[in-house]
Image: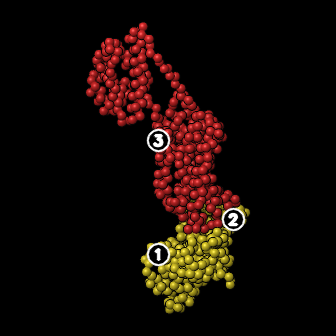
Chain colours: A yellow, B red
Amino acid sequence: MEEKAIICKELTKQFGDFYAVNKISFEVSKGEIFGFLGANGAGKTTAMRILCGLSYPSSGTASVAGFDVYRQQESIKKNIGYMSQKFSLYENLTVLENIEFFGGVYGVSRKEIKERSNDLLETLGLQKESRKMVGELPLGWKQKLAFSVAIFHRPKIVFLDEPTGGVDPVTRRQFWDMIYEAAASGITVFVTTHYMDEAEYCNRISVMVDGRVEALDTPANLKHQFSADTIDEVFYQLARGAKRSAD
Amino acid sequence: MKVLRFILQKEFRQIFRDKTILAMMFVMPTVQLIVMPLAMNFDVKNVNISLVDHDHSTYSQKLISKIASSGYFRIISSDFSFKEALMHIEKEEADLVVEIPSGFERNLVRDGAQKLAVSVDAINGSKASIGGSYLNTVISDFNAGIDINIRNINKTPSGVIDISFRNWFNPMAEYKYYIVPGILVLLLTMIGGFMTALNIVREKEVGTIEQINVTPIKKWEFILGKLIPFWVIGMTVFSIGLVVCFVVYRIVPEGSIALIYLIASVYLIALLGFGLLISTYSDNQVQAMFVAFFFMMIFMLMSGLFTSIDSMPTWARIISNLTPVTHFIKVVRMIVLKGSGFEEVKTELCYILAFAFVLNGWAIWNYRKTN
């Protein structure tokens, strides 16, 4: 576990004279569940998009799965899974068709796709719904499916951008079980969230305020450091100093 | 290649799931080809005439019956005064007023000359001028007939140039032969220009494009994955259009069908590239619609679909030559009506090829997986 999955040094993204991401530095170890916290507009999604190869950084360095974010975005893309804030499976394709498509574009063979999707449907309990349009599924199922699709090609790292937004507590719990399972199988999980109870599930968390990483440690250490009982309190103490208004 | 197959599979599934699109594929060419040529008929027939005959003579009757029997005019009223006749024009019942003055016959016979008043409603410019010139022809024909009757027989007739007139490639000068191939072009243009643009922009709106951009799909795979399905649809619509042309209008291309298909397929690639280009610049469907619409209007009006490019001012002709539609319409008309071969359409094909390269190249260049 010595190797690092993500290394960020002074990573910056500037839009005009606005610093969406301002010199953030952190490292994520392999197999770790890394929580990326911050208020709306703190720059979480921008940072994540850079790490996923969707956006160029303005300065600083970063490598994901050993590949450089400036020059090797396509290699990064082969090795990561991504679940965006917006639901991004095709609503007018069935569950199976979505799995097939996203598996296929990552180069999973048809035979593999078939085997893995059978297993997947079984664990998700979606066998009966496999030929239903994804648009007809309830949100909780959609999110679980989207996560499963994001790790279907067995990436090294999976990026989750607010994966449990708007999902009921029971489903959220199940979702985190899935995240643990993925982490146990060796996938590094990089997750943003607004739910502070979820932050407690992470191995380590960072808190972003106004484009900077203001705190980074295990949940227990952070609570100790800020002499708080919950991560919630830690977050309040940090976020209160924010100058940017939430979007 | 494997990845491309997955993309194509997905695109075709999505397209064929949308029953509206499927229906439109068949309805659009049929309806447009049947209805539009009728509506866009520029042949001038049924010019309505109000007559004012102050003479009531044999000659004036002869003239009237000549006008009536020409086939282009409909005499809707005979009035007693010019004022009354003009009322018909004001009410838009008549297009022309012909006033025959009293003493028409007498002056013709005695003096060999007589003036005749024709008043034309010029709101519909082309109908007015064409109707007016028809009438002129009828009257001068009548005039020539009179000459023989009234001139002295011992007078030698002046030299006459006899013109025999023939319309080539469209013997009856029927408008439908001109417009139907044009509408076929229109169909391909709409499909190429709109469908790809809207399809990709919709993925942007829904957010699925981001999911695509984060996969290792290559740019060319994505773009081909979008082009091929719509190319297939476009060619299908084009084929249906050709069948409709035959069934409804009995228009069979004079030239080679293979040549038409060759050029249509290149043209469709150019137009798909155009749609693609729009989609790379727009963020939502409304934007894409507006931009596409703007260019479509220019394409339609400047391409010589309805009007002759040769009668445009120079600057307009330059714009016209810069739209791919112009060249395609020209070629389609050449092949369908004239039966031109590859040699004759080579230059135009080069133009269309150039458009295909430039538009698609530009679109690929401007499509970014990483911003």
Distance in Å between CA atoms under marks 2 and 1 = 41 Å
Q: Which residue is mark 2?
A: A107
The relative height of residue B325 versus residue B282 in the rendered view (above or below) is above
Identify residue for label 3. B312
- Numbered-mark total: 3
Q: Are marks 3 and 1 in contact (CB under 8 Å)?
A: no
Residue at the spot 56% in from the left edge and 81% down from the top edge? A10
Q: Chain of mark 2?
A: A
Q: B128 or A34: which is nearer to us?
A: B128
At horizontal 58% and vertical 40% (from top left) the residue drawn is B332
- Which of the marked residues, 2 or 1, is nearer the chain's N terminus? 1
**Which is closer to the viewer, label 2 or label 1?**
1
Q: Judging from the image, what secondary structure is the residue with disc 2 in? A: loop
Label 1 residue SS: loop
Kind of residue indicated by mark 1: Asp
The structure residue drawn at horizontal position 66% and vertical position 77%, both measured from the top left corner, is A66
Snapshot quadrant of residue B217: bottom right
* Residue B313 screen position, x and y as percent: 46, 43
Q: Does any portion of residue A98 appear in the rendered image? A: yes
Q: Disc 2 marks which amino acid?
A: Gly
Can residue B30 be seen in the rendering of this structure? no
The answer to whether A150 appears left or right of B201 in the picture is right
Chain letter of disc 1?
Answer: A
Q: Nearer the viewer, mark 2 or mark 3?
A: 3
Are the residues under marks 2 and 3 on the same chain? no
Is B217 placed left or right of B83 in the picture?
right
Q: Residue A58 in the image: state x and y as whole percent.
A: 54, 75
- How many neighbours does mark 2 have within 10 angstroms: few (below 14), some (14-19), or many (20 or more)? some
The alpha-carbon separation of the residues under discs 2 and 3 comes to: 55 Å
Task: Please provide percent x and percent y for residue B35.
Answer: 49, 38
- Which residue bears the numbered disc 1? A17
Q: Are marks 2 and 1 in contact (CB under 8 Å)?
A: no
